[in-house]
Amino acid sequence: MSRSRLEQLISRSRLEQLKPPTLVALPEKTKALLVRCMRVGLILCLIASIALALCSAFSSQSHWFPLLDRNRTRSAISISSPTTTDVDSEPPTNISHILFSIGSSVHTWRDRSRYAETWWDRNTTRGYVWLDAKPENLTNVAAYIPYRVSGNWTRFKYSHSQSAVRIARVVVDSFNLRLPNVRWFVMGDDDTVFFPHNLVSVLSRYDHNRMYYIGGNSESVEQDVMHAYDMAFGGGGFAISYKLAARLAELMDGCLDRYYNMYGSDQRVWACVSETGVPLTKLGGFHQFDIRGDPYGVLAAHPLAPLLSLHHIDALAPIFPNQTHLDSIKSLVHAYRVDPPRIIQQSVCYDRRRKWTVSISWGYTLQLYPSMVSALDLRRPLQTFKTWRSWADGPFTFNTRPVSSNPCERPITYFLEHVKDGKSGNTLTTYKRFGHKERECNRTDYHHAMAMQRIVVLSRKMDPQYWTKAPRRQCSEIKNRASLRGGTMMIRIRRCRPSESITI
């Protein structure tokens, strides 16, 4: 072998040593199949990646990456938490956060301002009465209730009453004052009597930073049918949160032109609120009092709700006998100021030995039945009134029971004579028997009950937050049932025990 040939063999041997070793020797067909599988896998991965991207783009939550979703949630919470913290750190709603807006006129305010003066506290109440013009004589307006003159309201269309247009716009006028620390705008007529402390306890349950429209219906079905069931009737008053008032300020002028054919101011406000999508939050304490006659039945069997307002005072019989309309309201408001949450709250107790039933409407009236009457029946008001428009016997938006023509089936009625604000959170109210001019029952047991000339009621003041804690009618008991001497009965109102019921 030649030398050059030998060098070529040595060189080829070294090159083969430098090549990487082949682990598995595959046939050509297997190699081709493996290549195809790899290509198919790559295509499937590509399709899956596209599907995942589309799913992530159109889904609010990621089911593929829960950890990422948790982080995203934490980020969202951390971003929104300052707002939540600000709301939580706000002080509770108090009377200074409510702005009262009373719709009136120069012509009517001189007489009707007397009702507003009974409940308006010059030191704590905020708000204005809105008039159609500046009064020429300041003696025509209340001494300490400030007034404002409505502006820019004569340009709107109307088909019934132009004053209704002006009063509907009062909520916007009030908002545009931009007064500080206002959370709620409470609207009412010049003959509406409000109970402000109870309004505070109710409105504090709602977030003023959200849109709320709070009020009540008419008592007469015919009025609700004519106007609307989901409308807050203006005479009973209604409350609008600050956020909703801000939205109405933007919409109201357009609404007034769109709904020019509506009858009242409250209808116009309701129509505009409806455009925001906000429903009516109904509360039982607003009283439009679309009834005729004597409101006694309603006030003696008030629903389990704080008293918020009364209306149409001059169109009804005085709520206290032998008093004027104005003096009646003064008497009720005086009792209200002693224990605001308890005013006209009903409590029932029994004297089973004598077979007597007592129903108390605190701060107003007391009924003594010389028979056993269930609490269920006593919850239904005696129909001492008729419907507003037709003066009919109904229907009403609540159940009633008729006043019997038999005097032996009627209660002996007592009215508030005196209220005392005692020490350590106690109150004492005295109710005096009222002698009806109608014929009385001649039964012996009835005469024994008639011997009770006065009934004294003791109670603890109610917690203003009572209405936020699953409220329940309180119980009561006769303290001197063993010996009712001197024609006086003493009753104690207290919280019901957990296992206690008001049973005959």
Image: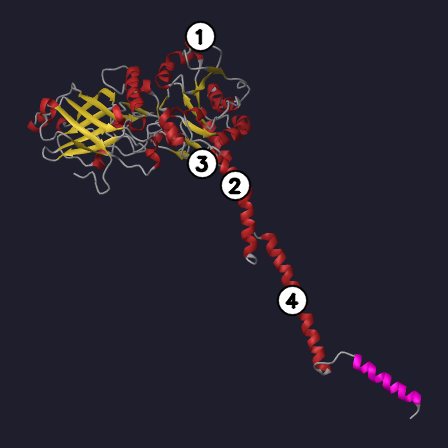
Mark 3 vs 4: CB contact within 8 A = no
**Residue under pointer 2:** 81
Q: Earlier in the sequence, mark 1 or mark 3?
A: 1
Disc 2 residue type (three-letter)? Ser
Q: Helix, strand or loop at disc 3?
A: loop
**Residue under pointer 3:** 279
Q: Earlier in the sequence, mark 3 or mark 2?
A: 2
- Compared to residue 416, the image places residue 306 above or below, namely below
User: Within 10 angstroms of label 1, few (less than 14), some, or many (20 or more) residues?
Assistant: few
Q: Which mark is residue 352?
A: none
Which mark's residue is nearer the viewer, 1 or 3? 1
Q: Earlier in the sequence, mark 2 or mark 1?
A: 2
User: Within 10 angstroms of label 3, few (less than 14), some, or many (20 or more) residues?
Assistant: some
Disc 1 residue type (three-letter)? Leu
Q: Earlier in the sequence, mark 4 or mark 1?
A: 4
Q: Earlier in the sequence, mark 2 or mark 4?
A: 4
Q: Position of residue 406 (x, y in %)?
A: 14, 28
Q: Is residue 425 left or right of 480 when viewed as pictured?
A: right
- Compared to residue 117, the image places residue 272 above or below, namely below
Q: Helix, strand or loop at disc 2?
A: helix
Q: CA distance from mark 1 to mark 3?
A: 40 Å
| Residue 60 showing in the rendered view | no
